[in-house]
Amino acid sequence: MPQTIDARSDAPARLLLIDRDAATGQVLAAPLTERLVAAEPLVEARSGRQAMEMLRANEYDVVLADLATLSDLSAKADESVSRIARLAPESLIIVFLDAASVSAALGAMRAGAHDCLSKPVSGEALALKIGGLALRLGRPRALGVDGIERAARERVEGAAPSVAEPAAAILPMWRQEQRIIEEAIRTFAGNITLAAAALELSPSTIYRKRLAWAEGEAKRA
């Protein structure tokens, strides 16, 4: 039986990093434990199979998974993410991508990830993203995130008026929608989770729209 998480919000949060590169953990460990209130030291797995064994024995509040490291689980990236997600139904799952790819991010989100980040990953930015997810999904247990929740809320509230301004030029509706979404993403320095929260959308909706826009541009080219 998996060891269950203490439901109290003041219990230490547990984080699992799945990455075959030990350097990733070295970069992320200190910023995460410093920025995430009451977080336990980062637990690491060097392969997808090792991570699955750990998830069967324990539960984690946050699972950080390098997509390439999960390749030993399945030849299909989305199936690899899905297998992790099925073992961690109560976890916040963030997938790391080696290169920015809307299609890869969308596939990971459909498979159960809550968000994606392109490598290299900043520990400070990752802590803010986790705080934003905990806030948006109503999971304070995910990280006793006093300061991070407050910062995420302030950024979301501060950005709302700017993204609601009407477009200066008369454009097709989809173009106006694209402009608003892209401006929101720029406002949050590329953080799609916080941009989605400001726009009252889900990150997966933004990923789908950006993929559709990219496919439309390719057809028009």
Image: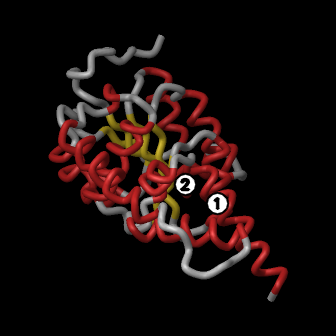
Pointers 2 and 1 in contact (CB under 8 A)? yes
Say which quadrant the C terminus sits in.
bottom right
Q: Label 2 amino acid?
A: Leu
Q: Residue 144: where, in percent of width, then height?
A: 24, 31
Q: Nearer the viewer, residue 67 or 31?
A: 31
Q: Which residue is mark 2?
A: 67
Residue at 67% over, 45% down: 110
Direction from residue 10 to residue 157 in the image, left or right = right
> Which labelled disc corresponds to residue 198?
none
Mark found first going from the N terminus, 2 or 1 = 2
Q: Label 1 amino acid?
A: Ala
Q: Is residue 145 above or below residue 201?
A: above
Residue with the most extreme bottom position: 221
Q: Residue 153: where, in percent of width, then height?
A: 30, 46
Colour scheme in use: secondary structure
Residue with the most extreme left position: 34
Label 2 and label 1: CA atoms lie apart by 9 Å
Residue with the most extreme right position: 219
Q: Which residue is mark 1?
A: 104
Residue at 61% over, 82% down: 169
Q: Nearer the viewer, residue 128 or 197?
A: 197
Q: Nearer the viewer, residue 103 or 218?
A: 218
What secondary structure is marked by label 2? loop
Q: Is residue 3 above or below residue 41?
A: above
